[in-house]
Image (spheres, rainbow, N blue to C red):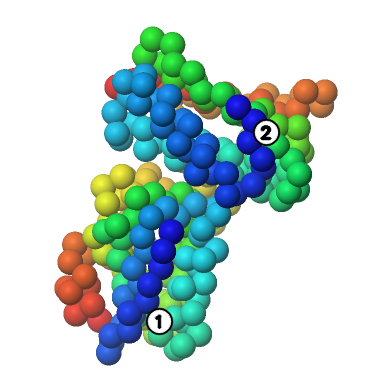
């Protein structure tokens, strides 16, 4: 499915993922995790890859095979290299706490696998995988 | 998302309902900032009817906590945090940055 790169479509993206996950037999806790991971991924695309370009869009797929749910997101925005994102220091006190990188950190915690491929011709492809508990 | 602010003698009780994501977090932030602009730095955020919060909401809470705790003038505490949101806050390492209460009356009374 194609979604406009706008924050007001995050609700629809989360609902799309939840519906597939529910039909695939994922439980409420897993569904919340999938929604949160999809939201963080989409928010990053909208905010960073497209830097708020209101005419941009991106493709989201969500499929279950057996006990495995796979979410992919494909955008043609700015190339993204996850190794350039500093991991948040969760032990840092209030004043030193950096908030950048939290979305990517949560995605990795919530999903079993997170892969990025950035290609100058085809754009960014994010693949996230979660297995049913 | 819906945010309402109730002023008590010693603190503000800010109730946030529905879903806080990148789309709605700016409005949530605004309610927190508004309290600060009114000279109110003791804030209890009531979440019993909050369905969802992404890191955009966490960021708003963190910014407000920094602002409120400056000069020891106050603090943000969280009230009735639903289990899924609590789990996400824990994953993000946020639970140690905020006192949490189950009951709004006790939270308001703690200030």
Answer whether residue B12 is visible to the viewer in this image.
yes
Neighbourhood count class around disc 2 (C-alpha, 10 Å): few under 14, some 14–19, many 20 upward: many
Q: State the residue position of label 1.
A: B41
Picture layout, residue B105 above or below residue A10? below
Q: Secondary structure at mark 1?
A: loop
Q: CA separation, marks 2 and 1?
A: 41 Å
Which residue is at a point 36% across and 21% down the rendered structure image?
A23
Q: Chain of mark 1?
A: B
Quarter of the image where one finds residue A26: top left
Answer whether residue A37 is visible to the viewer in this image.
no
**Quadrant of the rendering where the C terminus of chain A is positioned:** top left
Can you tell which mark lies on residue B76? none
Q: State the residue position of label 2.
A: A58
Q: Is residue A54 left or right of residue B44?
A: right
A91 vs A19, nearest the viewer: A19
Picture layout, residue A47 above or below residue B99? above
Picture layout, residue B97 above or below residue A20? below
A40 vs A54, nearest the viewer: A54
Q: Is residue A27 left or right of residue B59?
A: left
């Amino acid at each position: 499915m194609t979604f406009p790169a706008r924050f007001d479509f995050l609700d629809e993206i989360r609902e799309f993922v939840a519906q597939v996950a529910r039909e695939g037999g994922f439980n409420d806790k897993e569904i919340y995790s999938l929604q949160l991971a999809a939201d963080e991924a989409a928010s990053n695309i909208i905010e960073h890859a497209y830097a708020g370009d209101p005419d941009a869009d991106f493709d989201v797929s969500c499929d279950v095979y057996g006990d495995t749910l796979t979410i992919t997101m494909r955008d043609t925005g700015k190339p993204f290299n996850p190794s350039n994102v500093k991991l948040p220091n969760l032990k840092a006190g209030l004043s030193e706490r950096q908030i950048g990188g939290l979305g990517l950190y949560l995605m990795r915690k919530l999903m079993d696998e997170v892969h990025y491929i950035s290609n100058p011709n085809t754009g960014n492809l994010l693949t996230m995988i979660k297995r049913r508990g | 998302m819906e945010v309402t602010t109730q002023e008590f003698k010693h603190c503000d009780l800010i109730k946030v309902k529905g879903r806080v994501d990148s789309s709605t977090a700016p409005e949530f932030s605004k309610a927190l900032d508004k309290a600060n602009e009114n000279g109110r730095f003791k804030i209890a955020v009531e979440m019993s009817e909050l369905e969802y919060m992404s890191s955009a909401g966490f960021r708003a809470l963190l910014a407000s906590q920094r602002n409120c705790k400056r000069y020891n003038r106050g603090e943000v505490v969280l009230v009735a945090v639903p289990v899924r949101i609590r789990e996400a806050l824990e994953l993000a390492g946020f639970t140690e940055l905020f006192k949490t209460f189950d009951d709004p009356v006790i939270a308001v009374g703690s200030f």
